[in-house]
Image (spheres, rainbow, N blue to C red):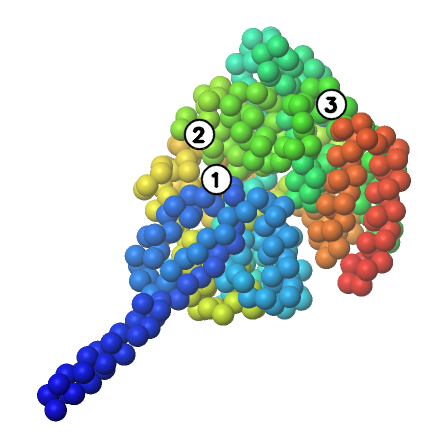
Amino acid sequence: MRMLEGFLLLALTVLSGCGSNDSSTTLSIATVNNGDMIAMKKLAPEFERQHPDIRLKWVVLEENVLRQRVTTDVATGAGQFDVVTIGNYEAPIWAKQKWLRPITGLPAEYEAGDLLEPVRNAVTYQGQIFALPFYAESAMTYYRTDLFAKAGLQMPAHPTYAQIAELAHRLTDRPNQVCGICLRGKPGWGENIASITSIVHAFGGRWFDMQWHAALNTPQWHRAITYYSELLKTDGPPGATSNGFNENLALFASGHCAMWIDSTVAATLLYSSVHSNVAGKISYAPMPTDQDAAAPTWLWSWNLAVPASSKHVEAAMEFATWATSRTYIGLVAKTQGWLAVPPGTRQSTYDSAEYRNAAPFAEFVHNAINTAIPRDSGTATRPYNSAEFVAIPAFQGLGTQVGQIVAATLTGQSSVDTALKEAQTAAEHAILQPGNAQ
């Protein structure tokens, strides 16, 4: 009898332990392979320490691949991801389609009112926030002060695209592997099309007129694409069609670009001697304009959202809240320094004397984000309320298709005339899809 009791006791002990290692929740997080997100992954063990019942599984992807994977997952309700990194393009569109969980019940210590108004508004749909901003950006013109000084050149306080082209030509030094300009050439609606759209808007062009008629095969687009293509072919890096944000960041940081027009978030890395070979040798100016035209704007944010298909909504909300909080910013400042904190989202970051001292570009970025008026940037009136993209569902496919078409002008596979005829046709077809013309 005692032996039987012993076996029963042993069996009960084993059974009581069954599944004990499975009591924790595992969150699958999809994010982009940008520096700030990689830093988030490195600091995530602190979240797991504070939440011992939650484990994090990371899927870190190149930007174009991330968008494809996440879009497929949330659109089909597959539930592969619990937290997704999305832009202010997707947030309101996906909220309308009921693909995202609304962000509710934020704790008082999160201080949602601390979020910069343009950034908060960009992820809001019908008065409800659907994604929490991780970092936000405008755009600026980076340039090498040492190369400018060596060539006896000076960056204008408010450069025009014509001036940028002239400077690039004088700064290109092929024997020393220095190109005069870097711009995004990798096809993608969030890659080369972001840069191209800002140039088009500056040159007085637009994707659609006020009646939502496609407007790509126009003199403004022709001048903008000719400028972009010729500038990159003449003074850009070899293989420009392979270069998106991260590739150009690496080129500039390693000393191979004299100028680069791109996201303000890159300043965090370029000004850091840990990540950049040119730290201490760079400065910045606003995005270029076209002669006396209205200045183009740029407003983008990477945000953490919870898909409607997530199986672990409460835990997912807990992580998204933690990673976008003032507490997280403080953790980055403590472990990596104030220069490394995710920029562009919170007023408290720009109120911090420590951040302003570490980041000489802080005031410029703060002002650029706060004054971003996407619909009114440039000279032509537009029906879409966005600066470097078009906020309609079809743009994810259309933008990438046009990005591929324009990239062919860089490789000599297509002329500008042919490219714009193809792009016009693509836009005409895309706008006929339901739910696009507003």
Where is residue 73 shown, x and y percent of the image? 60, 61
| Res 27 label | none
Q: Amino acid at mark 3?
A: Lys
The residue identified by callout 1 is 35
- Circle 1 SS class: helix
Q: 172 or 407: nearer the eye?
A: 407
Quarter the N terminus occupies: bottom left
- Of the two numbered discs 1 and 3 on the same chain, state the one appearing first in sequence: 1
Task: Identify which residue is drawn at 85% across, 30% down.
Answer: 415
Q: Is residue 197 visible?
A: no
Residues at marks 1 and 2 touching, judged by CB atoms closer than 8 Å: yes
Please tell me in which quadrant of the rendered image residue 227 appears: top right
Where is residue 326 shown, x and y percent of the image? 39, 51
Where is residue 383 shown, x and y percent of the image? 78, 52
State the CA–CA distance, disc 3 to disc 2: 28 Å
Q: Amino acid at mark 1?
A: Gly
Task: Identify which residue is drawn at 48% across, 21% down.
Answer: 278
Q: Is residue 127 left or right of residue 10?
A: right
State the CA–CA distance, disc 1 to disc 2: 10 Å
The residue identified by callout 3 is 233
Q: Amino acid at mark 2?
A: His
- Tell me if mark 2 has few (under 14), some (14-19) or many (20+) residues whose alpha carbon lies within 10 angstroms of its own: some
Q: 148 or 40: nearer the eye?
A: 40
The residue identified by callout 2 is 275
- Of the two numbered discs 1 and 2 on the same chain, state the one appearing first in sequence: 1
Q: Is residue 294 left or right of residue 141?
A: right
Q: Is residue 47 above or below residue 2?
A: above
Q: Is residue 88 left or right of residue 390?
A: left
- Of the two numbered discs 3 and 2 on the same chain, state the one appearing first in sequence: 3
- Circle 2 SS class: loop
